[in-house]
Structure formats: C-alpha cells, structure tokens
Amino acid sequence: MRTISRGIPGLEKRTINTAEKFPGPKEFNYRGRNYFFSGNLPQYRNAKLDWLDARNVCREYCMDLVTIETQEENNLVFTLIQKGDVPYIWTSGRLCDFKGCENRRDLEPKNVFGWFWSATRQKMAPTNQVPASFNFNPWSQTGHKKVRQPDNAEFDINGTNESCLAVLNNVYSDGISWHDVACYHEKPFICEDSDELLNYVAATNRGIRL
C-alpha cells in the first residue's frame, strides 16, 4: 500500500514538545494501544478544537488523532460516541489535497481514492468500497446534499473543501457514520498512541518509561 507524503500544511502551527506532557492520559486500551477521549478529561472536557489543533494536542502526549483501520476499532469508537451521547469527533482521516498530491494519478478521483490516515500516512480504502476487515461501508449514505459521503458539500456553500474526516452521531438521521467535514470546524476528539512519536521519544530519552 502506498503512503502519503509527510507534508501536511500547517502541522507546525503550534510548537510541539513531545516530552512536555508525557506520559499522557491513558483512558482506555485496545490491543496494547492507549487512547483517550477529550470530553472525558477535565482539562479538555468543554474543549472543541479544529482538526489541526486537536491533532497537535494529541501529539503533545506522543499520540495522534485516532485511526480507524478495523471494524473492531470502529465499533470501539462508535460505542464511546453512543454511550456518551457525543455529537461528533475528529479522526486522523485527511484528504490528500495539498502540495505534493496534485500529480498523483493514483489518487484520482480524490473523493474516492484520495483519503488517508494522517497518523500513519496510509491510504484508506476507496470510499465507494467496503474496507478490508469491515462488513459494511462506514461512510454515511447521506449528508447535507443528501448523497453518500464524502460529498464536499461545504465547497458549494462557501468554497471551503471538506478535507477532514469526522464521525458524526445521527446528524443527518443516518446513525453514527463517517463524514467529510471542513477542517476549521471545532469538535472534541479521540487520541491514540503514535508509534512514530513513542519511538522518537524512546530513542532520544534513554531510560524513559513508556
């Protein structure tokens, strides 16, 4: 599987010291990986952040926004949303629509083949197909334009691309499902251990307990 370029615009929007808040909160564990939901932590309980700021908060804890690569992990996220009556959350899902993506013929059309997980830089399954290890397509069948997701609906409203992936809770009477959303919107978020950052901290801080 091809990976996506590291170059995501604005990732340096805030200075990140990966050791500053490490070790971070470990609310629950799935297959050896730690997670936390921002709404369950006192310091972020009422916080809603845009996609980039949410990602940067995760990275301060050697984590990244959640990557949903299996149906089991998808169910875990859906259960958290359902039990907490959470209206929506950010994931690490991102559309490759920035510099370096323009000449990638394998990403065309972008709304089908151009999505990837920014935390791992791995391409997602085409949006019109059921992902491997899933038995259904997690992208919603409807949205603002009443067509299946992703639909880039906000571009028709104000010219803003819907380049980030959020999980929405029945916003369009469609249950809990994936939607493309403009990245400037503010939402709570789920963070997940980042192997890349954990390995970096281990390599640069000998003896640290991870």
Image (spheres, rainbow, N blue to C red):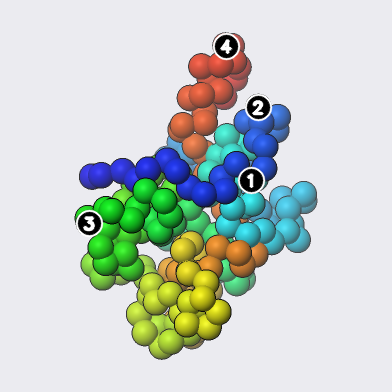
Q: What residue did someone put label 3 on? A: 105
Q: Which label's residue is closer to the chain start, 4 or 1? A: 1
Q: Is residue 111 visible?
A: yes
Q: Report the number of discs.
A: 4
Q: Residue, x 56% and y 45% (percent of image)?
A: 11
Q: Report x, y in % for residue 167.
A: 49, 66
Q: Return the mark for residue 206.
A: 4
Q: Nearer the viewer, mark 4 or mark 1?
A: 1
Quadrant where the image shows the C terminus: top right
Q: Amino acid at mark 2?
A: Ala
Circle 3 residues within 10 Å: few <14, some 14–19, many ≥20? few
Decide: marks 3, 2 in contact (CB < 8 A)?
no
- Helix, strand or loop under label 2: loop
Give the vertical position of 177 relative to 93 (above or below): below
- Helix, strand or loop under label 1: loop
Circle 1 residues within 10 Å: few <14, some 14–19, many ≥20? few
Q: Residue, x 77% and y 51% (percent of image)?
A: 42
Q: Which label's residue is closer to the chain start, 1 or 3? A: 1
Image-based side of 73 in relation to 125, left or right: right
Circle 4 residues within 10 Å: few <14, some 14–19, many ≥20? few
Q: What residue did someone put label 1 on? A: 13
Q: Which label's residue is closer to the chain start, 4 or 2? A: 2
Circle 2 residues within 10 Å: few <14, some 14–19, many ≥20? some
Judging depth in this view, the residue of 113 and 26 nearest the camera is 113
Q: Report x, y in % for residue 124.
A: 32, 55
| Cα distance between the residues tagged 4 and 1 | 28 Å
Q: Which label's residue is closer to the chain start, 4 or 3? A: 3
Q: Residue, x 52% and y 72% (percent of image)?
A: 160
Decide: marks 4, 2 in contact (CB < 8 A)?
no
Q: What residue did someone put label 2 on? A: 19
